[in-house]
Image (cartoon, grey):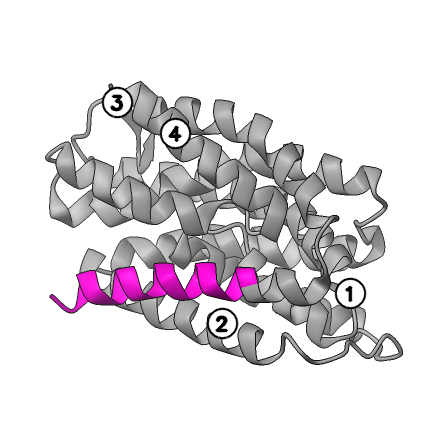
């Protein structure tokens, strides 16, 4: 039954990853939180376990997602090269920071953050992207990548919740912002997963079938299904208008944000 649940989570997460370029973390984290709670795991580690496992699955999801976007020429590789190093370093460091925070604090932080991103994205859905607006310098992109990486570890996401609005702000059209974000999810996920495994192992948590803060069975079930459905989501993304993508993206983030804010303040 647990494996079936993880497969279902993977199906939803993979589709979201391809459609929104979010790596599926905004779907995986809240669902894993619910599942791990029902499995009777300690409240002290549930949130960290959901974050670490989410990042591990995004390793697989992002590969499937960005390959599909690459076929449509939607990955800006020069931008990826500028953002990726900072993202990887930032996400590894962020995993260590997350280990110092309580589960309740993480829930509230995630809830507020996602609701803010949802608001800014929805309000900007009708704005026309200024294609003449240039991206910042390489050093500034590197710094932005580090900030995105830290946030990704704290929120268990592939960075799409920040990378997409960031690129969109600098004139990158929605489809290319989503495709580039999907590619950026790979270095973020690898660094973050390793960080949560390492820092979790140092805490000597007692969770069966896990390595540090990464649940192995959940990783296998979710990543297997999400690899397949991410391609479907990516194809759907290129069939929708940029405005529709922004609105759908913001509604998803707002819903997840409300969930975590409610749970954290109870």
Q: Earlier in the sequence, mark 1 or mark 4?
A: 4
Cα distance between the residues tagged 2 and 4: 26 Å
Residue 156: give x, y in percent of width and height. Answer: 42, 51
Query: Which residue corresponds to the image point at 48% horizontal and 77% vertical from the top-left?
Result: 119
Circle 2 packing at 10 Å, graded few (<14), some (14-19), many (20+), is some
Gap between marks 2 and 3, in whole Å?
32 Å
Q: Which residue is mark 3?
A: 2
Judge from the rendering whether residue 102 lies leftward or rightward of residue 17; answer left or right.
left
What is the C-alpha distance between the residues marked 4 and 3?
Answer: 10 Å
Instruction: Specify few, some or many for label 4: CA neighbours under 10 Å numbering under 14, 14-19, or 20 or more.
Output: some
Q: Residue at x 21, y 56 (%)?
A: 103
**61 sits to left or right of 130:** left
Closer to the eye: label 2 or 4: 4
Q: Earlier in the sequence, mark 3 or mark 1?
A: 3
Mark 1 crowdedness (10 Å alpha carbons): few <14, some 14-19, many ≥20: some
Q: Dot 4 lies on which element?
A: helix
Bounds of the magenta span? 248-266
Looking at the rendered structure, which numbered label has been put on residue 117? 2
Q: Residue at x 56, y 66 (%)?
A: 247
């Amino acid at each position: 039954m647990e494996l079936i649940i993880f497969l279902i989570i993977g199906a939803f997460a993979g589709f979201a990853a391809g459609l929104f370029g979010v790596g599926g973390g905004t779907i995986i984290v809240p669902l894993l939180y619910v599942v791990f709670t029902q499995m009777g795991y300690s409240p002290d580690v549930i949130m960290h376990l959901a974050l670490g496992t989410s990042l591990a699955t995004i390793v697989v999801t992002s590969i499937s997602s960005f390959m599909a976007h690459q076929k449509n020429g939607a990955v800006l590789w020069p931008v990826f090269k500028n953002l990726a190093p900072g993202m990887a370093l930032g996400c590894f460091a962020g995993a260590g920071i997350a280990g110092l925070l309580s589960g309740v604090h993480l829930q509230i932080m995630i809830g507020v953050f996602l609701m803010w991103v949802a608001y800014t994205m929805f309000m900007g859905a009708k704005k026309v992207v200024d294609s003449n607006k240039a991206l910042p310098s390489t050093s500034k992109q590197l710094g932005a990548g580090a900030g995105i990486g830290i946030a990704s570890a704290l929120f268990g996401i592939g960075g799409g919740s920040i990378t997409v609005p960031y690129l969109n702000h600098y004139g990158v059209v929605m489809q290319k912002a989503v495709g580039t974000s999907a590619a950026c999810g790979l270095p973020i996920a690898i660094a973050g997963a390793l960080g949560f495994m390492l820092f979790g192992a140092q805490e000597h948590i007692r969770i069966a079938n896990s390595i540090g803060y990464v649940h192995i069975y959940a990783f296998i079930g979710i990543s297997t299904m999400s690899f397949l459905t991410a391609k479907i989501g990516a194809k759907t993304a290129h069939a929708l208008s940029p405005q529709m993508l922004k609105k759908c993206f913001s509604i998803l983030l707002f819903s997840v944000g409300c969930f975590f804010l409610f749970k954290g303040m109870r």
